[in-house]
Image: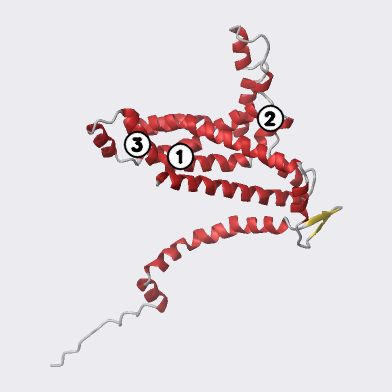
Amino acid sequence: MTVTSVSGPAPARPSAITRFLHRHEGWRGHLLLAPALILMTVAIIGPMWMTLMMSTWTVRGFDIIVTPGLANYTAMANNPMFPVLIWRTLEIALTCTIVTVVLVYPVAYFLAFQTGRSKAIWLLVLTLPFWTSYLLRVFAWRVVLGNEGAINSGLMSLGVISEPLSWLLYSQTAVTIVLAHSWAAFAIVPIFVSLEKINRSYLEAAADLGDTPARRFWRITFPLSLPGVVAAFIMMFVPTMGEYITPIMVGGPDSMMVGNLVQAMYGPMANWPAGAALAVVMMITIGLASLAFVGLNRLVQR
C-alpha cells in the first residue's frame, strides 16, 4: 500500500516592500500619513507657493508681467499707509483675542468643573447661535449697536445718556465686539479640553495640604490649562487677522483692515500681484505672532 502525501501550495513570500515596512515601524506611520500630507501639499502649500510667486510679478496696464521682482514689496515699504494698516489690524486682532479669551475662560472652567454629566447639553446651548449664518449675526449686531438699537435705546430710556452713543457702531469698538462674539465658540473648546484633561487628584492633594481654592487655581489649574489658552489665542488671532466682511459691515473708515485692502486689490483694483504681496506679508506676520504665543507658553511652562 502506497501513501501519497497531499500538500497545499507553498505560501507566497512577502514582497520586499512588505518586509521593509515590517522592519521599519516609522515608515509605516509615514505611509499612513501620506494621503493627508499629499492633500495638504496640494490644497495648502500649493496655493501658498502660487501666492508667493505671484507677489513677485507686476501689473502694467491690464497685463500681468511675470518677470520676478520685489517691486510690490518696495512699494509697500515706501507707502506710509501700509504700516498703519498692518498695525491697526494687529491692534484689532490682539484686542479681540485677549478680550475673548479672558471672557470665555470662566465659561470653559464652568463647563469642565461644574456641569457634571450635562456637559454635552451646555456645549450644545453655547454653540446654538453659531448655527445661523455669519451675515445674519453681523446684521443682528448692527441692530443692537445702532443709534436706535437696543443698547442706545435702553440707556436713553433709563436716563443714563441724553443722545445715542455714536462710537458703538461704525468704529473699531463695533468690529472688536462682533469679532469676539463670532469666534467665541472656537476659543471655548480648546480651553475646555485642556481643563477637562487636568487630573483631579492634583487638586484634591493640594486641598489636603491646605491650599485655598484661589491658590489651587493659580498654582495648578491655570498653569496646566495654558496649552489650551495658547491654542485659543492662535485660533482667535489667525482668522481675525484676515477678516474683511466685519469691518465693512460694522466698521467705519478708520476700521479698515488688511483683509479689506487685499480684497480690493483682487477685486475692483485688479492688482493681483500687489494683493498677493500684501497677503504674503500678513502670512509672515501671523506666523511670527503664532510662534511668539507658542514660545511664551513654553517659557511659562518652565
Badge 2 is on which residue?
A: 251
Label 3 neighbour load within 10 Å: few <14, some 14-19, many 20+: some
Residue 115 in the figure: left or right of residue 291: left
**In the image: residue 139, left or right of residue 219:** right
Of tags 3 and 2, the one toward the viewer is: 3
Mark 2, secondary structure of its residue: loop
Residue corresponding to mark 1: 229
Q: Quadrant of residue 237?
A: top right
Which mark lies nearer to you, 1 or 2? 1
Q: Which amino acid type is shown beneath numbered disc 2?
A: Gly
Q: Is residue 221 above or below residue 71?
A: above
The residue at 63%/30% (across/down) is: 175
Identity of the residue drawn at 45% across and 38% down: 189
Q: What label sits on residue 219 in the rendered view?
A: 3
Examine the rendering and report whether any part of residue 273 can be seen: no
Q: Give the residue drawn at x 32%, y 31%.
A: 116
Residue density around tag 1, few if under 14, some if 14–19, many if 20 or more, within 10 Å = many
Residue located 24% across and 30% down the image: 210
Q: Position of residue 5 (x, y in %)?
A: 20, 87
**Which residue occupies the extreme right position in the image?**
61
Vertically, is 94 above or below 276?
above
- Relative horizontal placement of residue 273, taking residue 250 as reference (left or right): right
